[in-house]
Amino acid sequence: MIGRIDPSSGDAVLLAAALVSEQLTRGHVCLDLASVGEIAFRYENGQDQGFCYDDWPALDVWLDQLAASAAVTVRECDDEAERIDRPLVLDRTGRRLYLGRYWYYQQRLARIIADRVASPPLAVDETRLASDIAHLFPNRHAATDADQCLAAASVVDQRLSVITGGPGTGKTTTVTKLIALRIMHQRAVAGVPELRVLLMAPTGKAAQRLNESLGRVTNTLEIDQSLRDQLLSIQAGTIHRLLRWTPVTPERGGPYTHDSSFPLEADVVLVDEASMVDVSLMWHLLCAVPSEAQIILMGDRDQLASVEAGSVLGDLCGGLDDAAVSGPNEERRRVIARRTGLALDEHAAPRPHALADHVISLRYSHRFAPTSGLGRIAAAIRAGDADRVIAELRDQDAGHPPVVWIQTQTPSAAISQIVRHATTEYTPYLECLATHPEGDLAVIRSLLRFRVLCAHREGLWGELNIDRMIAENLDRMGLIRRRRRAYWGQPLIVTRNDYRRELFNGDVGVVVRDPRGEGLTVLFESAADESGCRRVPTALVPESRSCYALTIHKAQGSEFHHVMIVLPREPSPILTRELLYTGVTRVADERDPITGERRFGRLYLVSTEAVLRETIERRIRRSSGLSEAIEAATR
């Protein structure tokens, strides 16, 4: 296409066009031309396949040739977004090259965010608000609850907010109380009984988990029954479903029914697992939210970014420290302090950041014990401190939970240990199933206590091979009778959404005997059923596969009591700090249902020291320019 538009385009222009397309497949929104040396090094050293170019142009020459091409539109990062009729856009100031539509997505997204940040806050009755906050956060002076209270007090009147925090920091608890706070305030001050709330998540599984968590938190609140009923009536859905995805037609630009001309009917829009939302989907979503409504983005900025191009949540939080409230607006900080009666961190010094008053960090994790060795390992990974991670792994006696580091150098020995430990961990589940062959909630819960998580899908260390080898060993030991098709005891993960049957990508079930004596059926956990689970005939289960092992990507958002992480023996661009952090933080401690005693989780880590160090030191750094575009739009 470049050649048709500009037949005179030289090799440098064609190379740039090929590279920007290739960068999109790696999650980058653009090609950072200033990093061409790094890109050239990767290709020339065989780290990437597909390109072979011996004469990499100098940056200034490259910029000049691109600017002169009829296939390229030259823009500045603070230019207003407009539809581009050329395939490429060059941000001359930022030295970035975009495909036209992605430059448009980013600029429009930056403008929407800037407009919301500049909008006046919602009107509130400060006295009433402080009273309601005190009621919903009775333990706000405790370290475990203070950040959650500060977050709710900060977000309650903002048009755009980001709540970020690691696993177990109480994000869902915070937003449940926040929604209750909005409803209570609206009833008392405005006399309006209903608040239109839309809860969204990128995947069906994430939406289902959000529903379950919101229901669980709601039932712990000391609120009147009408408010409880209203909270329980709020049901999350996928972003695509709530925007009403539709095929693009000549009559309608698509791909969603809801957009700026036909916005969503909502007063509050909350998006969970926002780190998984790419730049295109985030733009379509924010376009569809009414200007008077609140938008709350929630997620963990340190976890894996979206599969598609962009790292929107990371860009919005970039450059901010971990203070609960780190904004530079001193008057705003005083308002939050008055609402909560809490002192804000003194170290949260003012800093120039367009979104500093709109990003809230939750820091106290309920997932790990304060002295947990695993908690220290997760913190060290997050900080990129490979030496500290190695030291914690070697010190088996320090803290809890126990960590088993499998460093065996030969592949066969390592695979043998993986299979042996996995067999040991899955045996209690199969023993539970043996006593309840038709399955029940206890069987499902037993299965969900352990999972093997792989960095790759394919290859010797990939989930498909590891899953197969675990199944073969369980079969050899007589714990299962493996077949080509579904077999009794097989764990299945759904890989395609089926809205009619309410089965979603990521749902995990167990193949069990049909109580009616009609062969096999698949048992899924279901909060809507009195028994806590429901049965689906094997023939009606959508696309699915065995799941003794999963990829870390697939497990994002889930938690298990024990986890085994399998890293390959060879370096890989997939192996990043964020991937490892996401995998490690899938481990969750448990509470004994009778005594309340904490049961520590366990982590098995299969990796050589060299690969582990390289993984911790490699970060996901996606090129976008979104932060700069937002800063420019807010000036």
Image (cartoon, rainbow, N blue to C red):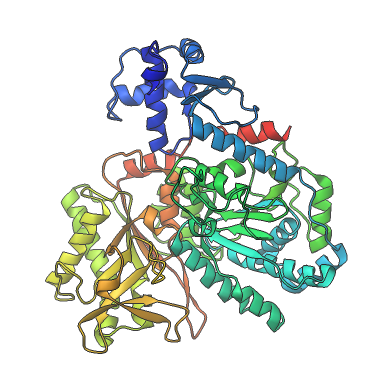
User: Is 534 in front, or is 256?
Assistant: 256
Closer-to-camera residue (2/190): 2
Q: Please, is residue 115 above or below residue 218 in the view?
A: above
Name the image quarter holding the N terminus: top left
Q: Where residue 290 appears, x then y in whole percent?
A: 68, 53
Rendering coords of residue 616 (x, y %): 42, 43
**Lateral position of residue 504 relative to residue 200, left or right:** left
Q: Where residue 534 sits: x, y (%)?
A: 37, 80
> Toward which corner of the image does residue 420 lie, by quadrant?
bottom left
| Nearer the observer, 48 or 250 | 250
Q: Is residue 409 left or right of residue 103?
A: left
Point out residue 200 in the picture as x, y percentages from the top left corner. 55, 60
- Residue 287 visible, this orientation: yes
User: Where 510 falls versus 44 (above or below)?
Assistant: below
| Residue 427 drawn above or below residue 41 | below
**Could you say which quadrant of the image residue 475 lies in?**
bottom left
- Say if residue 431 shows up in the picture: no
Q: What residue lies at 57% left-to-right and 50% top-to-bottom?
A: 285
- Residue found at x 36% / y 45%: 612
Q: Residue furthest left?
A: 476
Q: Residue at x 22, y 80 (%)?
A: 520
